[in-house]
Image: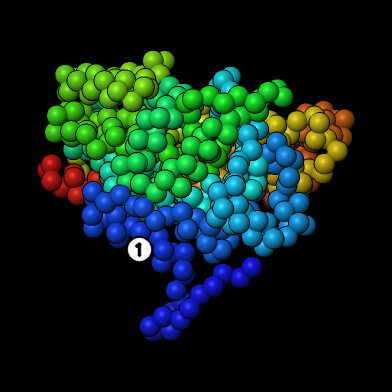
Amino acid sequence: MPMSASPAAGGSIVDPVRALQHTLYRAAKADPGRRFHALRDKVFRRDVLWRAWVAVHRNDGAPGIDNTTLADVKQHGVTRLLEELASELKDGSYRPLAARRVFIPKPGTAEQRPLSIPAVRDRIVQTAMKIVLEPVFEADMMPCSFGFRPKRSAHDALQVLVDEAWRGRRWVVETDIADCFSAIPHDKLIQAVEERVCDQAILKLLRVMLRAGVMEEGQVRRPVTGAAQGGPISPLLCNVYLHRIDRVWSTREHGVLVRFADDAVVMCKSREQAEAALQRLRDLLAELGLQPKEAKTRIVSLEVGGEGVDFLGFHHRLVRSRSRDGRRPVTFLARWPADKAMQHARDRVRELTARRRLSLSVGAVVQDINKFLRGWTGYFKYGHSAERFSKIRQYVRMRIALFISKRYRRSRHFGVRALLNFTPNEFGLIRLYGIVVSPRAGKPWWEKLNAGGERRR
């Protein structure tokens, strides 16, 4: 089903779905008190549903409880399925299936995270809802919120920590919200949505989605809390609910809040301000029926030689630069992959070189490792990560040598020799030493440090 487009001034092509989103965003931004009452018909627009299918297909994913895969949908006919969904949404007969509940390990820990997998057709509808609702709520979102928002990334959030530490905010409150996605009360979540949406058909559809429940061990559970983590619309609903914290937060009184979905830090100028900020967070969360995870909640003073904080996979530590060209040393916030991130990388490499994969060729295993390492280093290269990259590289080489020795039933020494000598490029293993490590995503780091050094001289 081709996406419709029409020529605009200057010969450019107008994307009707993007145009719809821009219109909704501008209308919401122009009138912060406006409540939207005519959104239902936009959800079952054919181009919106097609865009939703493209997003679902791109994300791939496992089937839901109906065992329908993306390949099954193609065989059935994508256009045919979208027409069926549009008809059900239009006459109000659409009913989502319960999501399939699975548990996945949390990186670097022994804990498991519950993940709910909706059926493919339900993922399409949720994505269509997100396409329509996101621009309305995005118009209200605060600068302190970074998670699951368009044109904002984890690296943007991380940069705030660097900038605020540079400005002297070196007392940090770190926390995350306990079971956030599963603990949000449905009634209060709908109230938060109603602040901007009064279209009863949309509100009814959201209630139906929230009450669809999850199937676990053959039993369907329909809790009265939670936006099931794993559904395309859940991150948006989480942000809409937690926006109530963002909008009442006082930077002057409690410091700079940085929130990435349910993970948060507050950068403060004193211990007293940090303690007040933590109490303010507890009070605001309690009003929402939530609470911080005590095991991950603490106040840290950033000092050279002191402890640091972990946030979004990075460990942050205050360090002092070496004297260069007669310049005075500069104190700044450095970051590198946290211990949990390192353990996650080692665990993944160990899985890819496990005994059960001995039937694969060494080259095939190395290709799989390269695919993982490109993603992992692509994220962590925006940090002072060279030393830790080197450690991962050494671990990878050791695991590949061990894999070779097991595959050919030879000694470990044989595996090492094979890795070094049998091919000119270690079976194509990427060289992490050659990856450019940049402490600032898209921005020159040393220019700022040098400028700061000049100011201090």
Residue drawn at x 43%, y 39% is 237
Which image quarter: residue 415?
top right
Q: Position of residue 376 (x, y in %)?
A: 55, 42
Residue found at the far top of this picture:
294
Closer to the camera, 27 or 139? 27
**Which quadrant does the N terminus fall into?**
bottom right
Which image quarter: residue 176?
top left
Q: Is residue 314 visible?
A: no
Q: Position of residue 186 (x, y in %)?
A: 44, 30
Residue drawn at x 52%, y 53% is 128
Give, as a three-letter code, the residue at label 1: Thr
Closer to the camera, 178 or 440? 178
Q: Is residue 129 visible?
A: yes
- Residue 10 shown left or right of residue 207 in the figure: left
Q: Position of residue 115 (x, y in %)?
A: 59, 31
**Which quadrant does the C terminus fall into?**
top left
Q: Which residue is mark 1?
A: 23
Closer to the camera, 203 or 231? 203
Secondary structure category for the residue under label 1:
helix
Residue drawn at x 47%, y 26% is 225
- Residue 136 shown left or right of residue 167 in the figure: right
Q: How many marks?
A: 1
Residue found at the far front of this picture:
91
Residue drawn at x 30%, y 42% is 195
Q: How crowded is the residue under tag 1: few (<14 C-alpha within 10 Å), some, or many (20+)?
A: some
Q: Position of residue 148 (x, y in %)?
A: 43, 44
Q: Is residue 373 above or below residue 311?
A: below
Residue found at the far bottom of this picture:
10
